[in-house]
Image (spheres, grey):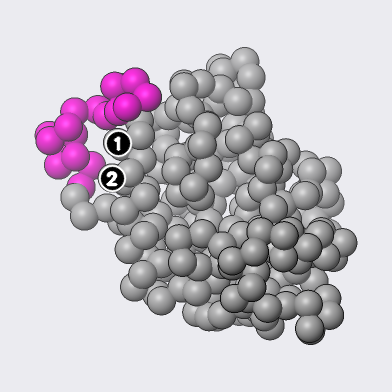
Amino acid sequence: MRALAWNPELARQEPATLAEINAQLARMDADARVQWALGNLPGAHALSSSFGAQAAVSLHMVTRATPEIPVVLVDTGYLFPETYRFVDELVVRLRLNLKVYQPTVSPAWLEARHGRLWEQGVEGIERYNSLRKGEPMRRALAELGVGTWFAGLRRDQSRSRRAVRALEFRDGRWKVHPIFDWNDRQVFEYLRRHDLPYHPLWHAGYVSIGDWHTTRSLAEAGDAEATRFFGLKRECGLHGLEG
């Protein structure tokens, strides 16, 4: 990308300018997008990960370019045992600078106050996501002073992500999705090329992996869109997406 093409203040205020930058980023490969973002977007930089099915791609790609970048994991207290072990494996293997953020109250305290929110329809799920995921993530971004946030969202993951772009400005910071246009085949090829693992539950038919109580396998759900939140919702709210 031409150096003169980047004016962050103008890009923040002019949708057409940001669209032009995104068009240029779309013509780059994912590694080049990471390098461009590190060189042109303000720090501090951070990478978030749920350590889900295909998380090793973004973790490897971004930390290879900037090894000390903080990797933010929101631990709701309800992750699968396999997820916690997967986190431990990748932290050692990729030498991750892991920053774990948790809600301010324990799962038991949450349930004493509110009951099993995830069983209380869409409103309960949204309240749960706000308390267990949204608040810790906002706190992480604030405490780490994050100016640029990397995330591994991809357009083909769900209908709610089909409009995801490489770059956006949200809630006072830049957000970068280096692999936004990748498909499952590209993910597979990257993992194989770098000898990286899928989440262990991927091999049991889980295509999207969150908390144990609101995640179902593809066989159980019958449709990829219904594997999270009983088909009532798809997004947890961390990324400002509806659905």
From the image, give the main secondary structure of the stretch colored magenta. Answer: helix
Observer-nearest of 241 and 17:
17
**Does residue 80 appear in the picture of this structure?**
no
For badge 2, the amino acid type reads: Leu
Say whether residue 108 is magenta: yes
Residue 175 image point, x, y percent: 58, 63
**Does residue 212 appear in the picture of this structure?**
yes
Q: Residue at x 60, y 25 (%)?
A: 225
98 versus 196 height, above or below: below
Query: Quick one: SS at disc 2?
Result: helix
- Label ID, residue 185: none
Q: Is residue 222 left or right of residue 3?
A: left
Q: Residue at x 63, y 25 (%)?
A: 224
Query: Quick one: SS at disc 1?
Result: helix
Q: Residue at x 78, y 49 (%)?
A: 182
Residue 233 image point, x, y percent: 48, 28
Find the residue positioned furthest to the right: 27
Measured Cα–Cα span from mark 2 to mark 1: 6 Å
For badge 1, the amino acid type reads: Arg
Residue 134 image point, x, y percent: 36, 50
* Range drawn in magenta: 106-124
Crowd class of label 2 (few under 14; some 14 to 19; many from 20; radius 10 Å): some
For the residues labelled 2 and 1, say whether their Cβ atoms are less than 8 Å apart.
yes
Res. 102 image quadrant: bottom left
Q: Disc 2 designates what residue?
A: 131
Residue 35 image point, x, y percent: 73, 76
23 versus 189 height, above or below: below
Crowd class of label 1 (few under 14; some 14 to 19; many from 20; radius 10 Å): some
33 versus 51 height, above or below: below
Q: In this view, does 154 lie to the left or right of 172?
A: right
Q: Disc 1 designates what residue?
A: 127
Q: Residue at x 37, y 24 (%)?
A: 122
